[in-house]
Image (cartoon, helix red, strand yellow):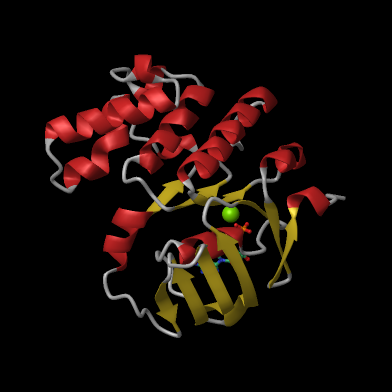
Amino acid sequence: MSSLAIKVENLKKEYITKDSTLQVIKGIDFELEKGEIAMLLGPSGSGKTTLLLMLGCILEPTSGRITLDDEIVYEDRWILKDTRKLRREKLGFIFQAHNLIPFLNVQDNVTLLPQLNGIAEVEYKKKAKEILTYLGIEDKTNYMIGSLSGGQSQRVAIARSLANDPRIILADEPTAALDKERAISVMELLRKLAKEQEVAMIVVTHDDRLLPYFDSVLKIDDGYLTKTKASETKLH
Ligand SMILES: Nc1ncnc2c1ncn2[C@@H]1O[C@H](COP(=O)(O)OP(=O)(O)O)[C@@H](O)[C@H]1O
Ligand SMILES: [Mg+2]
């Protein structure tokens, strides 16, 4: 086992539509260590979401190679046949909190996937309790999503991404709907998780003030990506 969580080599993605071909990712290379938390930056439309979806094995690249946790999952085609199993077992996704299911309570939102996967009730309830306690929202276990504040819902979205003990978390603008204080508390939490549980994370954000919470910065521009250390990165 290496210390790498993600390795991307010469990855390309083009979207082909009826009357045009759009080369979004033109050949990118980077690596992320286990426990490393990276900020993903780039102008709107530069391909940040596209990259996260490819790393999450949700969107098929055009070519290149993706290795996750020492396993080649894609090399000019899907190498790993059961990408759903990989998603279920190793990956966590955090999107904005409005992806939560409003008519379910907090516990059921957090454990929906384990429930659908047939995990026993005692098991998933124990897991939910553990995660919600870790995130400091155990008292909200039986609340409906609609009754929570923005910051609380975003914690539930994070809790949900943790239900399967992921090795890699992909987060698409998880703090976009939050004020500065709440954005910082979410980032503190993500950083703690990355370090304590050695989870590798890529977090899309436009908020320069969050830079101190990251180890590294991945910047996409015009289809190419550069990686720098957060401590040596000047934004603007
Ligand atoms: N399914 C798709 N079909 C065609 N073009 C797409 C599709 N999804 C995204 N795009 C285009 O690809 C580019 C990158 O999109 P996206 O990855 O969402 O960028 P970002 O998340 O950085 O804003 C944009 O120009 C977008 O319009
Ligand atoms: Mg996007």
Residue 50 can be seen, yes or no: no
**Which residue is nearer to you in this view: 172 or 216?**
216
Q: Position of residue 135 (x, y in %)?
A: 45, 26
* Horizontal relation, residue 183 to residue 15: left or right: right
In the rendered image, is residue 121 in sight?
yes
Q: Residue furthest top?
A: 139
* Residue sitting at x 49%, y 31%: 154
Which residue is nearer to you in this view: 135 or 95? 135
Q: Quadrant of the N terminus?
A: bottom left
Residue 169's x, y, as percent? 47, 50
Left-right relation of 59 to 12: left
Q: Determine whether 140 is above or below 110 in the image.
A: above
User: In this rendering, is residue 5 above or below 76?
Assistant: above
Q: Is 209 situated left or right of 141 in this image?
A: right
Horizontal and vertical percent for residue 225? 69, 68
Q: Report the residue at 87% width, 50% height from top.
A: 236
The picture places residue 12, in percent across and down from the top left corner, at: 57, 79
Q: Which residue is drawn at 37% across and 26% down?
A: 132
Choose top left, top right, bottom left or bottom right for residue 70.
bottom left
Q: In which quarter of the image is ligand 1?
A: bottom right
